[in-house]
């Protein structure tokens, strides 16, 4: 399914290997052929001119495909394609793949030759890059109760998003990910909508961009239910309640809101962000903290520059210089940078933690490792 970011179609088309662009046009039924020696920009403009002459529906479908290919053209996204191919044990002509000039062409090549791998990778890449999760800890349940309750959840979500006098349509897709159950709810909630339903089912061969998506993931080990949906706290709590009460048959009042405590950062000696026994970590640095002065409520932010010392040493010096006494200050937010060494590559994660509320981590491999560190450090403390 298409992503939600923006992209420059001319720039994207100019980066495609010309013969692959010709294959793409043929697959889309466009009367476009490659001209030998044509400049990249002229070729891209000619393609877009032909596309603009198509019907609104056809134009939209092709743009959604280009949007997906653009989303999968970064080096991390291309790794999703490679990993998905390995996981699905698909035969890939890696020699042809490696000879392609850039990642944009490699993403297009997968789209043209291995669409099943491409579509699965798009869904996983999108889900893993969602941030702003809101979570609650729920009593222990059998995970099959959640996966078997999809129809019930679809009905509950339909009640959350009304559409005039008729029933809102919703379909939920499950995505297999390690350590957690993931779901994406595709919701029709506007009069003009690109999402197509046929017999109340999402059209599988021509994915369209829905107006609204709701993301759900349940971590079995920590019994943590996370959701992300637009619409503010009302929609967030509504979705959490629908899962907890309608699907799992539990009481929402028995759930514990995830709690993140930053008081451990008030004492920086010894270093509370310990990583001594973590093999994949290159470094950890406390980059910034936001403080509130209790007597009058004023706020200050202390930030360590790019040449800061490793660990918490730079922050210790900054706090000492400003004569900060934590008997009078509360920590509201912290910014932490962790650099992992994964598959011989540095994978940095810089994230914010808000005291008592949450974080802006995604769900990539390196983010998953950070989540475990937050528990180890005593920052993620919520339990039933």
Image (spheres, grey):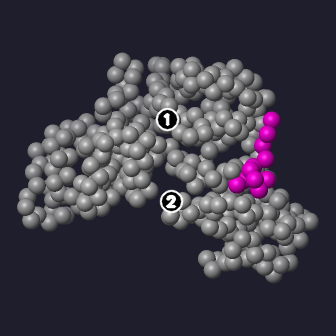
Give the image quarter of residue 293. bottom right
Q: Residues within 10 Å of mark 2 (few under 14, many from 20)?
A: few
Camera-side residue of 223 and 65: 223
Q: Residue at x 65, y 55 (%)?
A: 370
**Direction left: furthest residue:** 36
User: Circle 2 sits in a helix, a strand or a loop, which is it?
Assistant: loop
First in residue order: circle 1 vs circle 2 = 1
Q: Disc 1 to disc 2, how far (Cα)?
A: 24 Å
Q: Is residue 179 left or right of residue 344?
A: right
Q: Quadrant of the C terminus?
A: top right
Give the class, few, some or many, for how many residues have Cα within 10 Å of label 1's Cα (few <14, many ≥20). some
Residue receiving disc 1: 175
Does residue 40 belong to the magenta stretch? no
Camera sees residue 153: no
Q: Quadrant of residue 240?
A: top right
Where disc 1 sits, the SS reads strand
- The residue that appears at 10% across and 55% down in the rendered structure is 34
Q: Is residue 374 magenta?
A: yes
- Side of 342 where 83 appears, left or right: left
Q: Residue under label 2, please give it.
A: 343
Farthest residue toward the right? 327
- Please tell me whether residue 358 is drawn above or below residue 281 in the rendered image: above
- Asked if residue 222 shows in the view, the reply is yes
Closer to the eye: label 1 or 2: 2
- Residue that appears at 45% across and 30% down: 188
Question: Residue 24: x and y, percent?
Answer: 20, 46
| Part of the protein shown in magenta | 373-384
Q: In this image, 337 relative to 8: left or right?
A: right
Query: If the image is split into quadrants, where does the N terminus sit?
Result: top left
Is 240 above or below relative to 292?
above
């Amino acid at each position: 399914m298409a992503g939600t970011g923006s992209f420059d179609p001319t720039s994207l088309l100019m980066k495609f290997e010309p013969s692959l662009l010709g294959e793409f046009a043929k697959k889309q039924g466009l009367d476009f052929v490659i001209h030998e020696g044509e400049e990249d920009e002229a070729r891209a403009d000619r393609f877009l001119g032909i596309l603009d002459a198509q019907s609104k529906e056809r134009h939209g479908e092709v743009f959604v495909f280009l949007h997906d290919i653009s989303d999968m053209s970064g080096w991390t996204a291309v790794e999703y394609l490679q990993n998905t191919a390995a996981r699905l044990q698909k035969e890939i002509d890696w020699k042809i793949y490696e000879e392609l000039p850039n990642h944009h062409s490699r993403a297009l090549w997968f789209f043209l030759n291995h669409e099943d791998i491409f579509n699965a990778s798009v869904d996983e890449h999108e889900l893993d890059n969602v941030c702003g999760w809101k979570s609650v800890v729920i009593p222990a349940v059998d995970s099959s109760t959640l996966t078997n309750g999809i129809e019930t959840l679809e009905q509950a979500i339909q009640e959350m998003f009304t559409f005039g006098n008729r029933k809102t349509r919703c379909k939920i897709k499950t995505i297999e990910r390690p350590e957690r159950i993931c779901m994406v709810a595709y919701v029709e909630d506007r009069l003009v909508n690109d999402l197509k339903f046929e017999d109340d089912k999402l059209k599988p061969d021509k994915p369209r961009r829905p107006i609204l998506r709701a993301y759900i993931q349940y971590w079995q080990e920590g019994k943590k239910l996370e959701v992300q949906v637009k619409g503010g706290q009302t929609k967030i709590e509504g979705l959490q309640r629908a899962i907890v009460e309608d699907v799992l048959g539990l009481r929402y009042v028995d759930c514990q809101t995830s709690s993140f405590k930053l008081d451990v950062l008030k004492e920086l000696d010894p270093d509370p962000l310990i990583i001594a026994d973590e093999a994949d970590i290159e470094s950890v640095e406390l980059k910034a903290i936001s403080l509130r002065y209790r007597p009058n409520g004023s706020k200050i932010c202390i930030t360590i520059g790019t040449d800061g010392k490793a660990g918490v040493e730079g922050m210790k010096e900054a706090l000492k210089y400003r004569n900060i006494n934590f008997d009078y200050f509360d920590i509201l937010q912290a910014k932490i940078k962790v650099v992992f060494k994964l598959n011989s590559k540095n994978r940095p994660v810089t994230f914010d933690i808000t005291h008592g509320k949450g974080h802006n981590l995604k769900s990539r491999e390196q983010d998953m490792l950070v989540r475990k560190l937050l528990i180890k450090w005593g920052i993620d403390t919520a339990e039933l």
